[in-house]
Image (spheres, helix red, strand yellow):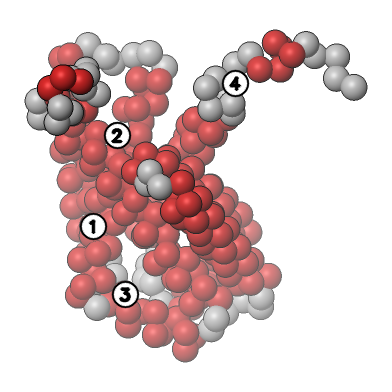
Amino acid sequence: MSLRSPVGRVLGLGAAGEGVGHWWTQRVTSVALVLLGLWFVFALIALPDRSYETVTAWMHAPFNAVMLSLLVGTAVYHSQLGVEVVVEDYVSDHAAKIVTLLALKFIHIVLGALGIFSVLRVAFGSAA
Amino acid sequence: MSNPKFERPLSPFMNYRWQYTNTLSILHRVTGIALSVGLLLFVYWLVSAANGPEAYASAQAVFAHPLTIVALVGFSFAFFYHLLNGVRHLVWDAGHGFEKSTARTSGWLVAIGAVVLTAMLWFLLVRGGAV
């Protein structure tokens, strides 16, 4: 049994009934992506080349593996939140909207799993 | 809308005249979607690295294709634009920078900054022998 009053439960949830969770998470992931994204760009420039040996050795380093995993996870999350809003804005047909949202969510989760798994596979594999 | 008898107020986006802020705002969304597509290439690159030298070599062939390089330049511009304009949006979220002159200046900074950073990135990559 919840001790919260009915009014207390709905306060701050707004017309969509979800509150500011989506909006706020988009902002939080955006701040994280500024840092992770800039790290990736600088790392990419700093690599002497982009050969298999160089790139896998770079991904093998624990710090890089963690940063890459965080980058993939956060980017996929942020992307999912972004395309959700776009679909909700432009797809008016209810069935089409639900199907598109589901498809995009599945694609994003698969992308995130593939990306992080690949980084970890290199990180935990024997050094190239 | 077609029947004058039921003339209703229009939603703001239907009767605003075009101005630079529209373009910047739409470009934020467009670059965001572009980056979502770019994630596919990014994950493809990671998967190929995990799948061994042969898979990585075939991915390198894909990335060396002129059309892919054009796309990568586009993605990098989208990245820098979305990043800079995203910070602009965060500042607005915090309640600052709404003055017309400030918003105009920050808009120009974002547009020029994105072009300059993209050019700098590719200058460094080409000089580093990556392309």
Residue at the spot of label 3: B63
Among the 4 quarters of the image, the one containing residue B95:
top left
Among the 4 quarters of the image, the one containing residue A114:
bottom right
Figure check: B98 above or below A93: above
- As shown in the figure, which amino acid type bears the numbered disc 1? Gly
Q: What element carries label 2?
A: helix
- As shown in the figure, which amino acid type bears the numbered disc 4? Leu
Q: Which is in the foreground here, disc 1 or disc 4?
A: 4
Residues at marks 2 and 4 on the same chain? no
Between B25 and A47, the residue placed more toward the observer is B25
* Cβ atoms at labels 2 and 4 below 8 Å apart: no
Which chain is indicated by disc 3?
B
Q: Is mark 1 on a helix, strand or loop?
A: helix
**For the point 19% across and 75% down, which residue is it?**
B66
Which chain is indicated by disc 1?
B
Q: Which mark is residue A13?
A: 4
- As shown in the figure, which amino acid type bears the numbered disc 3? Phe
Which of the marked residues, 3 or 2, is nearer the chain's N terminus?
3
**For the point 46% across and 37% down, which residue is it?**
A30
Residue at the spot of label 2: B85
Report the Cα–Cα distance between label 3 and label 2.
27 Å
Q: What element carries label 4?
A: loop
Q: Position of residue A62 (x, y in %)?
A: 63, 59
Q: Which mark is residue B74?
A: 1
**For the point 12% across and 22% down, which residue is it?**
B4
Report the Cα–Cα distance between label 2 and label 4.
28 Å
At label 1, counting other C-alpha atoms closer than 10 Å, the crowd grade (few under 14, some 14-19, many 20 or more) is some
Which of the marked residues, 1 or 2, is nearer the chain's N terminus?
1
**For the point 47% across and 66% down, which residue is it?**
B43
Q: Which is in the foreground here, disc 4 or disc 3?
A: 4
